[in-house]
Image (tube, rainbow, N blue to C red):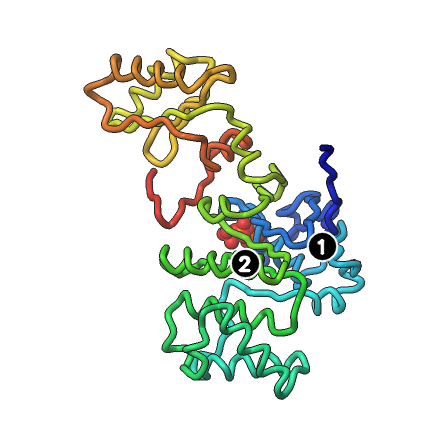
């Protein structure tokens, strides 16, 4: 049977977008287009331009060059129309902590001209979706950081936007709350078919997105699914930990001049040769143990991570680290 592919509707189109602070170019001709209902991660190390792109997408900044079109509204010219179609959650909290969850939601609803039973129903539905129905009458200041972030998102969705923009939504919340937050994000995508764009510098969050825009120093270095990105590095990656890392790095670069040997988070990561099978990599691992055995504290063979992909694409480290992994 012949497979038919149905072209999906494009929710957001970004064309040749550039931005400078003074003479400093921080976004350089970035283009991408997002299908309706997709969860997109905008990933990049600190300073790569994510927040600037977020501000342009959310109409806070007007781009001096390029074009953004959200569901037919091109901005800056049609910024007001586009703005009504999007829900925005900024990095800095926007809730009034001295008001209850419901009061915060009602105020937001009024800003969008929502009133009465329609507004009440919408608030109930959203708080249920985000697992907050029990906290409706509680002061925001009594909620955990993760719950407050969920209220922020619920609030941003009151006017039924088509696009949800989230700027580093996990900032300041612990890993368990982060996982919970992402679970709710998925539920939202599944149940409402919302298009979601989320900026992050956390590689484990990026793994969960349908597609990633990877920025480095203001340039688009990739626009792909996480699994396709990992395919850029065919095969398994070897990783070695040792107290004698520098010595080992020098020796390995001589031994395997034809392979990428890099230092990541206090370990040496060695990319496979393109034709290498897992068995070949295992043999390499055994030969390393034979040669450096006494100095090796850990040796692992694993699938390439997005960190490996970033190194592969840019030739340098993803400077920021995940909240759960720290190293050099
Ligand atoms: N108001 C500003 N004036 C001048 N330069 C700025 C301004 N805001 C950001 N920059 C610079 O622009 C570049 C991109 O910054 P941006 O905040 O967009 O990056 P980012 O990827 O969001 O980083 P972070 O994860 O640290 O927030 C950085 O080099 C930053 O120093």
Label 2 crowd (10 A; few <14 / some 14-19 / many >=20): many
Seen as rendered, the residue at the extreme front is 1
Quadrant of the frame with the N terminus = top right
Q: Earlier in the sequence, mark 2 or mark 1?
A: 1
The x and y percentages for residue 240 are 31, 26
Q: Nearer the viewer, mark 2 or mark 1?
A: 1
Q: Secondary structure at mark 1?
A: strand
Q: Secondary structure at mark 2?
A: strand
The x and y percentages for residue 241 are 28, 29
Residues under numbered marks 2 and 1 in contact, where contact means CB atoms less than 8 Å apart: no
The x and y percentages for residue 136 are 45, 80
Residue located 74% across and 38% down the image: 4
Please tell me how many numbered marks the rendered image carries.
2
- Residue 89, relative to residue 21: is it above or below? below
Q: Quadrant of residue 189?
A: bottom right
Residue located 75% across and 69% down the image: 80
**Disc 2 C-beta below 8 A from ligand 1:** no
Q: Is 20 displayed left or right of 78 in the figure?
A: left
Residue located 73% across and 51% down the image: 10
Spatial CA span between label 2 and label 1: 19 Å
> Which residue carries the number 2 mark?
167
Seen as rendered, the residue at the extreme left is 294
The x and y percentages for residue 290 are 25, 13
Disc number for residue 33? none
Seen as rendered, the residue at the extreme bottom is 116
Quadrant of the frame with the C terminus = top left
- Residue 278, relative to residue 323: is it above or below? above
> Which residue carries the number 1 mark?
11
């Amino acid at each position: 049977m012949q497979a038919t592919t149905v072209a999906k509707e494009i929710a957001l189109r970004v064309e040749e977008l550039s931005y400078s602070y003074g003479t400093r170019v921080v976004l350089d001709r970035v283009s991408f287009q997002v299908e309706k209902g997709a969860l997109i991660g905008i990933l990049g190390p600190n300073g790569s331009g994510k927040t600037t792109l977020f501000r342009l997408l959310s109409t806070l900044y007007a781009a001096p060059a390029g074009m953004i079109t959200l569901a037919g509204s091109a901005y800056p010219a049609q910024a007001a129309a586009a703005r009504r179609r999007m829900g925005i959650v900024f990095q800095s909290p926007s809730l009034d902590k001295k008001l209850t969850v419901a009061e915060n939601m009602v105020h937001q609803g009024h800003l969008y001209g929502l009133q009465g039973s329609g507004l009440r129903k919408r608030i109930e539905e959203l708080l249920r979706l985000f697992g907050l129905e029990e906290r409706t009458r509680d002061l925001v200041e009594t909620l955990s950081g993760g719950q407050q972030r969920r209220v922020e998102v619920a609030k941003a969705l009151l006017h039924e936007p088509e696009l949800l923009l989230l700027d580093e939504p996990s900032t300041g919340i612990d890993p368990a709350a982060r996982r919970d937050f992402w679970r709710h994000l998925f539920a939202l995508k599944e149940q409402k078919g919302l298009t979601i764009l989320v900026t992050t510098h956390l590689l484990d969050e990026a793994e969960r997105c349908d597609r990633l825009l990877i920025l480095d120093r203001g340039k688009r270095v990739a626009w792909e699914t996480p699994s396709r990105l990992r395919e850029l590095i065919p095969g398994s990656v070897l990783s070695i930990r040792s107290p004698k890392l520098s010595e080992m790095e020098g020796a390995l670069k001589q031994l395997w001049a034809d392979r990428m040997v890099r230092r990541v988070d206090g370990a040496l990561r060695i990319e496979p040769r393109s034709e290498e099978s897992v068995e070949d990599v295992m043999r390499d691992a055994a030969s390393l143990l034979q040669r450096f055995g006494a100095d090796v504290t850990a040796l692992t063979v694993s699938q390439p991570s997005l960190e490996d992909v970033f190194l592969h694409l840019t030739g340098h480290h993803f400077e920021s680290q995940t909240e759960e992994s720290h190293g050099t």
